[in-house]
Image: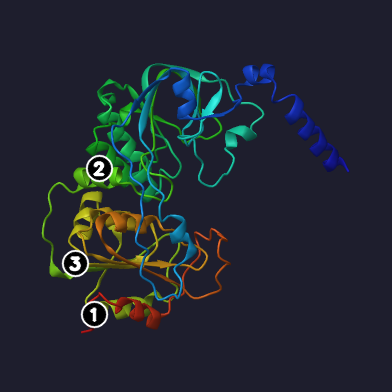
Amino acid sequence: MLIQLKTIIRDVATKYIFCTKFWRKLFYTPIGTCTVTDLQKNSVNIWHQNQEVLDKNRILPLSIDQKVHWKFNTFKSLSAKKQFVIIAQNWFVWGNQGCVITDKGYVLSEVSKEYDNLSHSVFKQYKLIIPKKIKGITAVLAASGASVFYHWMVDILPRIQLLKDSGHFDQIDKFILNYQGLTFQKEALKKLGIPIEKLIICNGHWDFHYEFETLIIPSFVSPLNVVSVYTINFLQQTFLKSVKKLSSNDSKLYIKRINGRRILNETEIENFLLSIGFRSILLENYTIEEQALLFQNSNYIIGPHGAGFTNLVFCKSGTTVIDIFSPLWVNPCYWTIANELNLDYRYIIGEGNRPNEGTDLKGKGENILLNLDKLKELMYLPPLLLEEN
């Protein structure tokens, strides 16, 4: 009874008190969301990337399944939107994923995303801490998943290039970023000319709230789970400036994982692949540039679905890729890269019950039991030419 009463009181307060202008002004909670289109009507300073955005008609992947997994059809025509950079005064950033709030109290929806939340967590707060004020020119780079190699490479780094394209990069005093000091983060920032001293680190979600004299907001350049041509070109130009020929032992790679999902019968799978000339590698042992060279020089890449496949952006046309999924987690993001680069992309789903079509259980961490005979069947489907030794 007491719990129900508390719930009723909270709901009434949320509806009639926390949404009032007085409360929002006193405790900084946002009014709602806005879009770039809304801002254009209010004469906000917005720079747009001058490029044509084309509709996509991606080629569906090769599989031994009778019917291609429904997720691929969902992303068959999804393409990137036009990029932008906004220059604004007295705007706010809240949380560790770069939630941008305008001076009027609206969350800018295009850049304020939490991948695991349908509704942004800022709207679940009864009050925000008093914002600290920062003078000078600051750019926001923070986004969901900065500690994950894929999101770092696809979501965050291209925003830096967008700042350079817009001509604002050299004017920026500080960069807001959720930064953990990971090896690939350090390497990339050094390569792109951002010293650690210029970072405003926003790792604390609830206690990060700042107001900026001038805030520069670059858009994302790829939709969620889609990798744009802009991103591919940028990553190639940044990390693959000199292509070296590696040993022939590196032409066929099996990508192992030490964290997250893995193949339960990996020894069986790995022994087979080694017997036909594959090399097993842990990408964590290589720099970004070394990973780029490995993928550029490979003709065949197999592995459980994971962030290491981000390096497909460095592959040459015709490279064969087999993406191994759990039945509870299928993500077409690397297939979108394959379509842009003309890769021979194939996928296989491990053993176990599959959810109904249209149902996404989001079993990201689920391990995979892989049927070796099914893998062989997929590998030898035309146009693949691969002979066992």
Determine the image quadrant of residue 245. bottom left
Expressed as whole percent of the image width and height from the top left, the position of residue 352 reads 53, 75
Tell me, yes or no, if residue 260 can be seen here.
no
Foreground: disc 2 or disc 3: 2
Residue that numbered label 1 is attached to: 276
* Earlier residue among tags 1 and 3: 3
Whole-number angstrom distance, CA of label 2 to CA of label 3? 25 Å
Question: What amino acid type should be assigned to the residue bearing mark 3?
Answer: Asp
Expressed as whole percent of the image width and height from the top left, the position of residue 297 reads 17, 61
| Disc 2 to disc 3: CB gap under 8 Å | no
Left or right: where does residue 313 sit relative to residue 89?
Answer: left
Tell me, yes or no, if residue 58 can be seen here.
yes
Expressed as whole percent of the image width and height from the top left, the position of residue 223 reads 41, 45
Q: Secondary structure at mark 2?
A: helix
Residue that numbered label 3 is attached to: 250
Whole-number angstrom distance, CA of label 2 to CA of label 1? 34 Å
Which of the pair 179/272 is nearer the observer? 272
Q: Is residue 273 above or below residue 95?
A: below
Q: Secondary structure at mark 3?
A: helix
- Number of other residues with Cα within 10 Å of mark 3, as a class: few under 14, some 14 to 19, many 20 or more: many
Which of the pair 195/48 is nearer the observer? 48
Foreground: disc 2 or disc 1: 2
Classify the position of the N terminus by image quarter: top right
Determine the image quadrant of residue 271. bottom left
Question: What amino acid type should be assigned to the residue bearing mark 1?
Answer: Ile
- Number of other residues with Cα within 10 Å of mark 2, as a class: few under 14, some 14 to 19, many 20 or more: some
Residue that numbered label 2 is attached to: 234
* Earlier residue among tags 2 and 3: 2
Expressed as whole percent of the image width and height from the top left, the position of residue 284 reads 31, 56
Question: What amino acid type should be assigned to the residue bearing mark 2?
Answer: Phe
Q: Residue at x 49, y 23 (%)?
A: 92
Classify the position of the C terminus by image quarter: bottom left
